[in-house]
Structures are given as structure tokens and as C-alpha cells.
């Protein structure tokens, strides 16, 4: 029976590479002539940049964004020679030569970063590729209007830059009726006219769905590639990418008045059957799902009862016929019955946070096209056995 380590794992995170490919194609269709870059920061939102980058490169993606220099260094060998890897945070002071040595193109966010990069360019006696980010209202990263004024007053500051892209970032793009979207776009247009001619990029995933006015020459989707919903309050047009199946460690019957978990925050109001599942907050499964989340077995919804522990959580499985579950069976924590976005809503956060925190502890399975044969014990997932 149990012959492989796969059967011993507490949980399996399944990443559907074919779905990521489909999502990339869908975004590219929507973008028309604008280039579709890919944002692979935070290890591709926790899903594995080294597995996902080659899939996107094979689709023709030639522009990749990461947040940190180290992420760029790790990604560079995974993408084609001709591809550009952009580092959103830019080089930390003194690290410009490291970026150059790894052929990473920094996003320059401040006058200090512009000076650091052009200083290196002058020492080398040649122009260096760079992206310029403008702050159009988010007050996070990018040149402020005052900094832009100083650049425009002294255009020589940009002399040794090979300006590949001028970009900004939207603060509220998932809310299509938010007035900030239009305001930021106007500010972007005004600022861009003051700079040398260069391709422009404004949209993240949600920005792509604001329409062609927001597409410019390139878009920078991350979340939508990984199946998160791009438009608040609308059906998700993208394919789900992750599933999380967790194993039952133990089953028990409890009586009315018995309590469950740390702090004894849940009390049975009648006889109940409780399953203890091998996933907890140390796996990135939010503790805020205590007494709030839902797992599934087949089509049966199984509420999380009691506090989520570090390595386990409790489910009320009384809805299932006795004997339907046994130790070692898998329940669905993320999957067709419960999307990442739905879990995020239950947990009071956003899908991005759920995805990026999903654990390094899970057994990971990458599927592309035909699902690989499941270990025998996961087959019971497909339906409640009679
Ligand atoms: C993270 C990020 C993106 C990608 O955003 P999504 O909402 O995940 O598509 C794009 N641009 C910048 C500057 C970012 O920081």
C-alpha cells in the first residue's frame, strides 16, 4: 500500500503549468499589440519561478520582472539570452555592478538610483539599459513629481541611460470604477511627455482589464498568470492554477459540549466527528481561518472548527457518512470547490497573500497537460466512496 514518500506527505500543492500557459495566452490576446511581460517576484508568487519561467519563455515572453536583485540573479539563467530581467526595487546603493554583471536591468525609482546607475555608466564610458519608474499617486516607488522636475531641468542626468521603458504602477486597478485609475493614467501621460521617447508600461494584471487605454506598449501581469481574479466583483476569466490537498492524520467522535483546539474556541452542540488535518499556519495556511474556513471532500463542505494550529487544523466531518474518511485520506483545502480568492475572503486578506505564503513544507507536484497519475490514496478525492 504505502510505498512512496508521496504517501507520507502531510499535504500536496499541485501547480498546473498548463493553466499558467493558458492564462498567459488569454492576457496576450487581450493585450493585442502590447507586449505581455511576466512578474515572477517572490518566487513567482510562491509557485516556483524556476519551473514557471521556462513555460512562459516558451510562449514567447521576453520581459520578466522580479523585486530583488537576488531574485534576478536566480532567474537570469532560466530565461532566454535575449530576454530582459527587470529588477523592480532597483539596485541598492553600491550594488550597481552586481546588477550589471548579471545582465539585470534595474527599475530606477529615485534620483539616488538614477545617480548610482548613471555613475556606473560614466565610469564604463557607455550607456546602460534602465527602466524609469514614475510615481503617479501611490507614494510607494518611482520618481516623485519634484524629482521628475529636477531631471527635466537637467536632462544630462539621463545622458548615459539607455531608456528601455518608462513605467508607473496603479493603486486601485481591481476596482474598475475607482477614480484613481483615470487620474494615474493622466499623470503618467503628462509625465511621459517630459521625458525622452521610450516604451511605456502602466498595467498590472487588473490594469489589463481596464481596457486598451491602459495597455501602452507593455503590461506587467503577475497575479492573473497564477489564476487570481483581476476584477473585483466580476467572474474570474482566468484558469485556476493551484490545488492544495491535505491529509487526515486522525479521526475522532466527540460528544455535545466537547471542545476543539487551542483556547477551546469551538464547542460541539451535539455529537460530532472531527478530523485532524496535517496543515497549519506554519505551512502558510492562515490562522485567521480558525472557525472560519471550509475544506471539501468530494462535494461535501467541511467547516474548520477550532483554532488553526501550527501544523494541523480540525474539520467537522459529521456531514459525511461514517467510514467515508480514514486516516491518510486527502481533503481539498484549495481546489475546484474553494478558490484562492474565496479562501482569502474567508481569511480577511487577498489572494496574493494566500499564494505567496503557501508553504515550503508541502510536497509539490507540477502538472502540465495530462495530470500525472495520482498516488492511490488521493484518488478518493474525486468523490465520496460509497
Ligand atoms: C507586483 C507588481 C506587478 C504585478 O502585479 P499583479 O497585480 O500581480 O499583476 C506589476 N508591477 C509592479 C510594479 C509590481 O510591483
Image: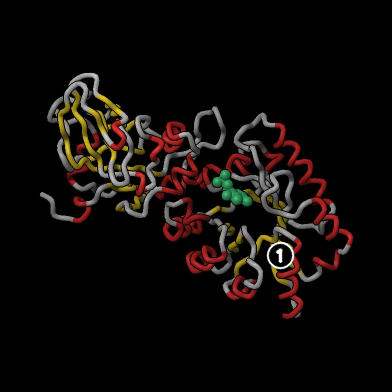
Q: Is residue 298 visible?
A: yes
Q: Is residue 332 left or right of residue 257?
A: right
Q: Is residue 370 left or right of residue 3?
A: right
State the colouring used for the structure image: secondary structure
Furthest toward the front, the residue is 263
Q: Is residue 28 visible?
A: no
- Choose top left, top right, bottom left or bottom right for residue 308: top left
Query: Which residue is labeled 1 in the image?
Result: 113
Number of other residues with Cα within 10 Å of mark 1, as a class: few under 14, some 14 to 19, many 20 or more: many
In this rendered view, identify the residue nearer to me: 64 or 110: 110
Does residue 122 lie above or below 25 as drawn?
Answer: below
Furthest toward the bottom, the residue is 124
Q: Is residue 333 left or right of residue 195?
A: left
Q: Is residue 281 left or right of residue 37?
A: left
Furthest toward the left, the residue is 1
Residue at the spot x=74%, y=63% of the render? 163
Furthest toward the right, the residue is 153
Any atom of ligand 1 within 8 Å of the CB at mark 1?
no
Residue 262 is situated, as x and y percent measured from the top left of the image, at 29, 37
Residue 270 is situated, as x and y percent measured from the top left of the image, at 20, 19
Residue at the spot x=69%, y=64% of the render? 130
Q: Quadrant of the C terminus?
A: top left
Residue at the spot x=32%, y=46% of the render? 310
In this rendered view, identify the residue nearer to me: 251 or 197: 251
Residue 190 is situated, as x and y percent measured from the top left of the image, at 82, 46
Residue at the spot x=76%, y=37% of the render? 183
Does residue 76 lie above or below 141 as drawn?
Answer: below
**Does dot 1 land on a helix, a strand or a loop?**
helix
Does residue 16 lie above or below 154 as drawn?
Answer: above
Residue 28 is situated, as x and y percent measured from the top left of the image, at 57, 46
How many labels, in total?
Answer: 1
Amino acid at each position: 500500500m504505502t510505498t512512496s514518500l508521496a504517501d507520507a506527505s502531510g499535504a500536496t500543492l499541485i501547480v498546473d503549468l498548463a493553466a499558467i500557459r493558458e492564462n498567459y495566452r488569454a492576457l496576450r490576446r487581450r493585450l493585442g499589440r502590447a507586449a505581455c511581460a511576466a512578474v515572477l517576484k517572490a518566487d513567482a508568487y510562491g509557485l516556483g519561478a524556476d519551473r514557471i519561467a521556462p513555460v512562459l519563455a516558451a510562449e514567447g515572453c521576453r520581459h520578466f520582472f522580479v523585486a530583488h536583485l537576488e531574485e534576478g540573479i536566480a532567474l537570469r539563467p532560466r530565461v532566454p539570452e535575449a530576454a530582459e530581467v527587470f529588477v523592480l526595487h532597483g539596485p541598492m546603493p553600491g550594488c550597481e555592478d552586481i546588477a550589471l554583471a548579471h545582465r539585470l536591468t534595474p527599475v530606477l525609482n529615485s534620483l539616488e538610483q538614477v545617480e548610482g546607475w548613471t555613475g556606473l555608466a560614466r565610469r564604463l564610458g557607455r550607456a546602460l539599459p534602465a527602466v524609469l519608474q514614475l510615481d503617479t499617486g501611490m507614494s510607494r516607488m518611482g520618481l516623485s513629481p519634484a524629482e521628475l522636475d529636477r531631471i527635466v531641468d537637467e536632462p544630462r542626468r539621463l545622458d548615459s541611460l539607455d531608456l528601455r521603458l518608462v513605467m508607473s504602477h496603479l493603486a486601485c486597478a481591481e476596482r474598475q470604477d475607482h477614480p484613481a485609475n483615470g487620474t494615474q493614467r493622466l499623470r503618467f501621460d503628462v509625465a511621459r511627455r517630459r521625458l525622452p521617447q521610450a516604451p511605456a508600461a502602466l498595467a498590472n494584471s487588473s490594469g489589463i482589464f481596464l481596457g486598451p487605454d491602459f495597455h501602452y506598449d507593455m503590461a506587467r501581469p503577475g497575479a492573473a498568470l497564477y489564476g487570481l481574479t483581476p476584477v473585483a466583483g466580476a467572474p474570474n476569466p482566468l484558469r485556476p492554477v493551484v490545488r492544495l490537498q491535505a491529509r487526515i492524520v486522525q479521526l475522532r467522535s466527540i460528544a455535545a459540549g466537547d471542545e476543539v483546539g487551542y483556547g477551546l474556541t469551538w464547542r460541539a452542540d451535539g455529537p460530532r466527528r472531527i478530523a485532524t488535518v496535517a496543515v497549519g499556519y506554519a505551512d502558510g495556511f492562515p490562522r485567521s481561518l480558525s472557525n472560519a474556513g471550509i475544506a471539501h471532500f468530494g462535494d461535501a463542505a467541511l467547516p474548520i472548527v477550532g483554532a488553526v494550529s501550527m501544523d494541523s487544523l480540525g474539520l467537522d466531518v459529521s456531514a459525511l457518512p461514517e467510514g467515508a474518511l480514514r486516516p491518510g485520506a486527502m481533503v481539498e483545502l484549495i481546489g475546484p470547490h474553494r478558490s484562492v480568492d474565496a479562501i482569502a475572503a474567508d481569511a480577511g486578506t487577498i489572494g496574493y497573500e494566500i499564494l505567496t505564503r503557501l508553504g515550503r513544507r508541502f510536497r509539490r507536484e507540477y502538472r502540465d497537460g495530462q495530470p500525472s497519475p495520482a498516488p492511490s490514496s488521493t484518488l478518493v478525492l474525486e468523490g465520496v466512496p460509497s
